[in-house]
Image (tube, rainbow, N blue to C red):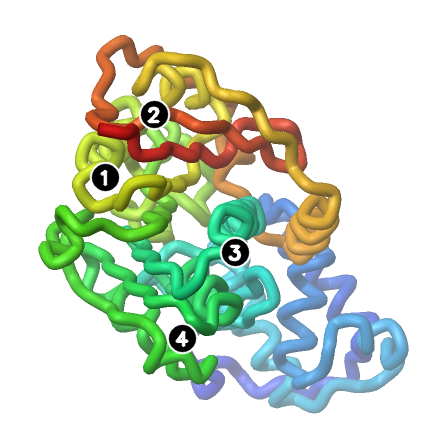
Amino acid sequence: MPQTLAEIPTVNSKSSIGDVLRDGEESLAAAGVENPRLDAEHLLAHCLGIEPWRLLLERERVLNPAQEAQFQLLLEARRLRRPLAYILGEAGFYDLVLSVDPRALIPRPETELLVEKALQILEGTTGPEVIEIGCGSGAIVLALARRLPSGRIGASDVSQAALDLAKENAARLGLEGRIDFRPGDLFAPWPDRRGRGVDLVVANPPYLSREELDTAPPEVRDYEPREALEGGEDGLAVIRRLVGEAADYLRPGGRLLFEIGSGQGQAVRELSGPAAPVIARSEATKQSQLGSNSAGQVSVEDCFAPSAPAMTDSVAAGLELIELAKDYCGRDRVAVFGRRNG
């Protein structure tokens, strides 16, 4: 695969935007890309430095050789199933635009429900204290920091590379002074919060089973960091640890909030026993996610049929399941645990 423009033969281009989009779409479709036209539009708009919607207005515009060469370079990367967001170097999340690369998972539209639910839980709380476990690119914690100006907010990740990316995004958004970033696994970076607790712990843990990840589309399986996706043999290994340890880091009335796979609702219910109410997706965020999905992002949940084994052993020491929130497709998406009294 060519790596730079210099490695591509010079193109004596007389091709219009309409011509190269048609050819690009056909090329990506032949490679098995799910949304070939949409991806071709995003790649070409990136090369031209314009918004994708302008392509239709300028479809007769002729590309110069450098522009067409760059487009061919990006097409080749997408034909090899490199994720579109990694090629473009950025992804939208909530109302943020984040830098993304293989150091961290690409933010998904469905994860916006975590932010929505966290803000709902913290409404009316003065100076809330929040930590995110496994922050990746920083999408969740940065969205929260922007909306909680009086909040005391921390974030950690076991991957130093991912943590560096989150710090870069914080600086890009002018939020670097708002977040206490720490390296380490789960709650290990937060010994000073043990006992006294925080108001909210939020996480998007790896929850795909090994088999699910091995059969996922190439964009997910071959390019995104495996440690951010795979949750062990049944997908629940990290969730068990998270729920088992969280009570020591929550103050009375505190909440643990985390994303789950669509087939894991019953298993998560059994972590603490009593059934919890099911909360439907809000209409506003339904539309937000539908819009985000139209940009060509591969959803983790679209990679496999929902399935999860039952968990019969309660591991939620000191916690109880408060609710399961559903996404806009009606699938279990976010679990909310609360610290038990006593």
Q: Position of residue 208 (x, y in %)?
A: 36, 33
Q: Is 242 displayed left or right of 78 in the figure?
A: left
| Residue 126 visible in the displayed image | yes
Q: Is 253 displayed left or right of 120 in the figure?
A: left
Q: Report, in whole angstroms, how far the alpha carbon at label 3 lies from the one at label 2.
A: 23 Å
Disc 1 crowd, CA 10 A, few/some/many (<14, 14-19, 20+) = many
Sequence-earlier tag: 1 or 3: 3
Q: Position of residue 22 (x, y in %)?
A: 78, 62
Sequence-earlier tag: 3 or 2: 3
Residue under numbered circle 1:
246
**What secondary structure is marked by label 2?**
strand
Q: Report, in whole angstroms, how far the alpha carbon at label 2 lies from the one at label 1.
A: 11 Å
Sequence-earlier tag: 2 or 1: 1
Sequence-earlier tag: 2 or 4: 4
Residue under numbered circle 2:
320
Q: What's the residue at 28%, 29% (across, down)? A: 341
**What secondary structure is marked by label 4?**
helix
Vertical placement of residue 312 versus 3, above or below:
above
**Is mark 3 in CB contact (under 8 Å) with mark 2?**
no
| Residue 298 visible in the displayed image | no
**Is mark 1 in CB contact (under 8 Å) with mark 4?**
no
- What is the three-letter code of the residue carrying label 4? Asn
Q: Which mark is residue 30?
A: none
- Locate the N terminus and report the quarter of the image it occupies: bottom left
Q: What's the residue at 63%, 47% (across, down)? A: 30
Q: Report, in whole angstroms, how far the alpha carbon at label 1 lies from the one at label 4.
A: 27 Å
- What is the three-letter code of the residue carrying label 2? Glu
Disc 3 crowd, CA 10 A, few/some/many (<14, 14-19, 20+) = few
Residue under numbered circle 3:
124
Q: Position of residue 143 (x, y in %)?
A: 49, 64
**What secondary structure is marked by label 3?**
loop
